[in-house]
Image (cartoon, rainbow, N blue to C red):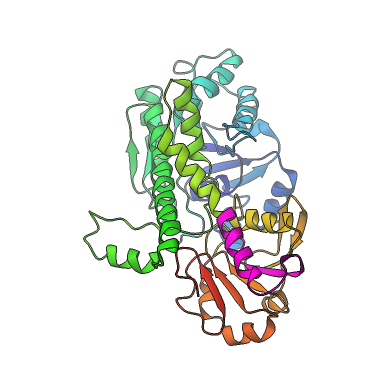
Amino acid sequence: MDICIVGLGYVGLPLSITFAQAHSVYGYDVQEEKISLLKKGHSYVEDISDSDLAAVLDTSFFPATDPSCIEQSEFVIICVPTPLDEKKCPNLQFVKSACETVKDYIRRSHIIILESTTYPGTTEEVVIPILEKSGLKAGKDFGVAYSPERIDPGNSQYTIKNTPKVVGALTERDLQRSVTLYSSVIDTVVPVKDIKTAEASKILENIFRAVNIALINEIALIFESLGIDVWEALKAASSKKPSTFMPHYPGIGVGGHCIPVDPYYLAWKAKEVGHLARLIELSGEINDYMPLHTLYMILNKLKEKRKIEDAKIAVFGVTYKKDISDVRESPAVTLIELLKDYGIEVVYHDPHVFKIATKHGVIKGLPLEEAAKDCDCIVFAVDHTVFKTLDLSRLQSLMRTPIIVDGKNVFDFVEGFSYAGIGKVNL
């Protein structure tokens, strides 16, 4: 089977490499820089090594900026971003643009599959009408399916191959063909009765996580005021059998392309059909508030020691979760922007990220000791594994004012520092 993957980002490139182990795969992307790197054998996605790429490049994987490769394929899989606009409403510009391109090359017997996470109804209400501008009819002349991506960046235990794949389609024939495709490279495929159910399954997964993270974030704020360590309380609560308690953990916010975005996608769709998704919207508001709460925690600690306008802050970790290089929607970047809004000097150290783009411009990361030197507060925004073994006495000797704000329970106790942490008893 010949396959064309439209969009070679964090989802599309790993999916391409996986399919290329068994099929011929064209990888189409509008960004020439990406295609140039791939053709030279260089991967820009952390989960795909250069050796992974080399194993299939020019033999079963063919990256291209020419969309005519779409016409040569039996299956076309769209993997493009689905962000929010400035009003936190769905922004489907990338999906629409991809579909406009695909419709120019669509042919009879094609199966078009959308993998981008979105609200239920997108495929039938947005994707199909664009594709049918080709003059062909969905479900008759070409097939349509939806299969939500479930990639977890940096997770080597659960890969595309061993993560169950949900698939819904417009017709039974489309479903069977799509299931056959995915079953060729994925251990378990989960067919569902229709496209909307498949779309809903992914949004449900992510909203479940978002709501539970918001719950523990709110509890962490309450416990801070009560002088209770939420991390110890979580450990104790987790001693009950897993079927009755599923721990989620607080932090300075949520990041990545799913958890901060998807609740607003369903809330928007709910309003369209006359429902108020109050709990879902509130969970988004709570999680969005956490960087601001962290800012207040930093400012309160600084006030005890020096003038805020003279302070220097070092943020340790800028990714959206530990041990990866992905900074999409990272709350650490939001925190840096908030600190700079106050006119505070901010530097950062992250062993995985050399520079970040902020509304204040590009900021380059510093080596650990250079970042810590003469700073008044170190904020552990991410719990990178390497941070847990840092020599705190060495950090203390470098700092001008020994303050630590711990956003992810990196340390249980820090002797010699003025300490504050999310959901912790401040010292």
Residue 135: x, y in percent?
Answer: 58, 12
Give the camera-side residue of 295 and 50: 295
In the image, is residue 95 above or below residue 284?
A: above
Give the camera-side residue of 115 and 207: 207
In the image, is residue 405 above or below residue 33?
A: below
Q: Is residue 228 visible?
A: yes
Q: Is 356 on the left-hand or right-hand side of 414?
A: right
* Residue 337, picture quadrant: bottom right
Residue 27: x, y in percent?
Answer: 61, 42
Give the camera-side residue of 301 and 128: 301
Q: Is residue 44 visible?
A: no
| Magenta-span inclusion, residue 306 | yes
Give the camera-side residue of 419 and 279: 419
In the image, is residue 31 above or below residue 111?
A: below
Identity of the residue drawn at 35% across and 41% down: 189
User: From which residue to which does the magenta span run?
Assistant: 291-318
Identity of the residue drawn at 49% across and 39% down: 262
Residue 162: x, y in percent?
Answer: 38, 53
Q: Residue farthest to the top?
A: 135
Residue 24: x, y in percent?
Answer: 54, 43
| Magenta-span inclusion, residue 187 | no
Q: Is 265 on the left-hand or right-hand side of 395?
A: left
Q: Is 239 on the left-hand or right-hand side of 300?
A: left
Identity of the residue drawn at 47% across and 32% down: 267
